[in-house]
Every structure is written in C-alpha cells, then in structure tokens.
Image (spheres, helix red, strand yellow):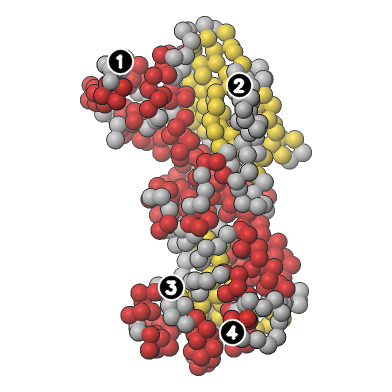
Amino acid sequence: MNALLLTDGYKTGHHQQYPKGTEQVYSNWTPRSNKYAPQGCDKVLSFGQQYVMQWLHDYFEFNFFSKPKAYVCNEIKAELSLYLNTEYDISHFEDLHDLGYLPIRVKSLPEGVEVPIRVPMLTVVNTKPEFYWVTNFLETILSTMLWLPMTSASIALTYKRLFKRWALKTDADNIGFIDFQGHDFSMRGMGGLQSAVASGMGHSAVFFGSDTLPVIHGLRKYYDADGFVVGSVNATEHSVMCAGTKDDEIGTFRQLMQTYPTGILSVVSDTWDLWKVLTVYLPALKEEVLSRDGKLVIRPDSGDPVDIICGTSHHTGEGTAVEKGVIALLWDIFGGTINKEGYKVLDAHIGAIYGDSITTTRAEQICQRLADKGFATTNVVLGIGSFTYQFNTRDTFGFAMKATSVVVNGERREIFKDPITDDGIKKSAKGLIRVDKVDGDYVLVDEVTETAEKEGELQLIYEDGKLTNKTSLSEIRDSINKRL
C-alpha cells in the first residue's frame, strides 16, 4: 500500500491550512489519563517506540521512496481526487519524494522505564521548514501503532508486580517463578496479526512465557533479541482430548505422559468433567505422575477462574470438589511441602494453569484466596489472553499526540488546547517541552526555550531517516526488573 495512505483523510489538506509561512510543527505523545486502566496501572511503561519508528521508516522506504515518483504520487493524486471530489495538488508529496527520507526528529524517553500520567513520552518535529506538514501527517500512524504495545506492556507489569508481591509473602525463595507466571494466550483474540505482535511484544518485555510465536520474530527484528526470547511447554487442546474420546480420557492422559516422559506437560482438563479428572483419574494415575521426570500441569478452561482454582469455599479442610478447587484437590492427591513462610507448595511433579477470562482483578483474588487457604501463590500460572489485552483502546491511558509549538515566519508560537467543555484530561502542554527526572520520577516542564528543549531525559531515537540510540530486549528487561 502506498505509504501516503497511512493517515486520516482529513489530514490530506492540512498543509494548506496552517498559517502562511509556517516552518515548524512540534508535537508530543502523552498518556493523559488512567481513568479506564486496570486498577494498579498508575503509570505507563515506555515500550514500542523503537519498533514503531523502524517499522515506519521501512514502510516509507519500501512503499514510497524506493518506488518511482510518478507512480506513487500519481496514484495518490488519483485516489485523493476521487476521495475529495476535486483535483488534488501533489506537489508537496513530490517534494518529499525528491528529498528521499522522512524529515523528522523524534525524541523518546528510554524504553523500559515507567512514566507518570500526563508526562510526554515522545516528541516529533520536522527538520526542514518546507515539510512542516509532515509532523502531524504522521500523527495517525504513530498513534495507531504506539498505544497498544505501551498499554499491554503497562498492564503486564501490573500483573508482574502483583505476582511478585504475593510471591514475596507466600514463597519468597521461588521469586524467579514470576517471570513465567503470566503467560501470553492472547493471539487468537487480538485484532489481527500486527496487533498480536505489538501487544505480544509488550507482554514479552515483562514476562518470559508466551504462546504468541510471532513475537520471537518481532523482538529479534526490532530489539536485537538473541538466544532465548520467550518460551512455552508441550500442551494439549480440546481437539486432542476429544479425539481420544470421553470414555477413555484417562487413557489420553496416560498416552500423553508416555509421549512426553520428561519436562512440563500441560493438559486441558475440562473438556468434559474437570472434577472427575481431579477426583478419579488423577488419583488412579498418581504413581505414573510422580514417577515422571517432569511436571504435569492441569489446565481448567471454563467457569469462574477464582472459584475453579481456589474453590467456592473460603475455608480449608473438608468439602466437595467444587468447594475445594483445583489446587486443594491436587494437594490432597500429590501433597507437597510447607515452605519457610508456612504456605503449601505442591509436589514438583504437579501444577496448574488457568488461561480463560483472566483480569488483574481476578488475578489478585486468586492470589488472595490461595494465600487465605494456606497455599503459595506460585502454585498456579495464569494465562493472560485477549480478555486482558484486547479489552483496551487508546483511551485506556488517554494517549494522544498534540502539537504544542509552531514557528511561523521565523517566530515561535507556544500553542495548546484546553477545551472548556472537557474535564481537564484533554488539556495539553504548552510550547516546547523538556522532561526532567526529579527524585527518581519523570516530570514535565513546558514552555521552555529552544536551548532547554535539547536537554533533559528525552533522547534522540530518529532523525532524517536514521535510527539512533537503539536499545535491546535484554536492556529493556533489565530496566524493568530493576524498577520492579
């Protein structure tokens, strides 16, 4: 697709609408509100800028600059003339093609750091006066590609912080487990391949467990990931269990353990009767499970996640299978140990994962209920799917890219928006901006001088067709874990 189509239709006339003599448009990308974010998401995790800028650079290179000028410019002329019902002047597009690169300067806060709400994370400005229109021509594509990886990474970090808090309370010696306790199950429910990759990379900046295989390519391509990137385990699905027949489900379990005599094996266990699996089949398979060189992971896949994992009863001791829940039933069969914090840890040969309709609220409830019943929260892995990552929009963190400074006929104008009909969320910064670090936190300073704008924590990542100050997945993960 012609790269000039990567914008909103109404932007195609903005080059004619700025004041005569406009030479520069300076904009910033800012999370304006966490009003719709999950509880605990008080900041935004900086992630995705390098991916987006590399993707954008490559797209314009392959789908505009490297193609014949007459072809790409006449194509857009034909389309926009039809679209606007008037002959469209493409001279500014022809000039851009002659230039041969995107004449913009992009500065960003480092990826892997947490940023308070209302603090700009990115600035964009044109580097050549005649291309003042390019800055906000790119607003739409930057917005559509940036908000999702940042949102998913931020929510993933909220999960990880939750898991760590509970692990420190109930199983501190096993703290490394939290890297894998949140597992990405979201790909099939995302809004297309690019969304799955963008969101999945955000998850994988925080966690090491993922079933979204395309993130491996994405993180290697855009973040120089080498060696281990993300991992998973051998696992069944309902078609496998159904093919083995309902009458011989125990035989399917046995055959699977023979197929995978070592390592972690995850078996979906609610194709028919989860409670029968836990009270009839697993007791019968106990010695085979315990003699296996690895862990058998039981995966419920329907019902209320909190009640299924923890049981409907809030008390320990006797009760029905439904009242006890998965973890207590596994303890009854396989036992385990009591750790130094006084919590029960299942035998290393058995475990559980739940990956349907998980939210941060439900994750908190699961951890609370397990701890209340005397179980370490590290007894379960939670699959984080599209019920978490697709249930978001740009408004989850109120992301927006807004112009705050222009130069017209050599004179700088500090501009801003502050709608009288708004509740204050849409009020923008004003003028040139700088982001400083004060007592370990990022703060906005606006209305600064051109000299002051060059200072601060925002660092150059792209200028006139070249990426700079590149970071890697390992550096991002290290930064996240240090702050965690």
- Percent of width and height locating residue 110: 59, 39
Q: Amino acid at mark 4?
A: Ala
Tell me if residue 205 comes above or below residue 127 in the rendering: below
Mark 2 and mark 1 lie on one chain; the one further toward the N terminus is: 1
- Percent of width and height locating residue 114: 64, 44
User: Badge 1 local density, few (<14 within 10 Å), some, or many (20+)?
Assistant: some
Residue at which label 3 appears: 235
The secondary element bearing badge 1 is classed as loop
Mark 2 and mark 3 lie on one chain; the one further toward the N terminus is: 3
Tell me if residue 182 comes above or below residue 134 in the rendering: below
* Residue shown at 66% from the left, 59% from the top: 162
Residue at which label 1 appears: 89
Residue at which label 4 appears: 321
Residue 445 visible in the shown view: yes
Quarter assignment of residue 365: bottom right
Residue at which label 2 appears: 416
Mark 1 and mark 4 lie on one chain; the one further toward the N terminus is: 1
Q: State which mark lies toward you, 1 or 3.
A: 1
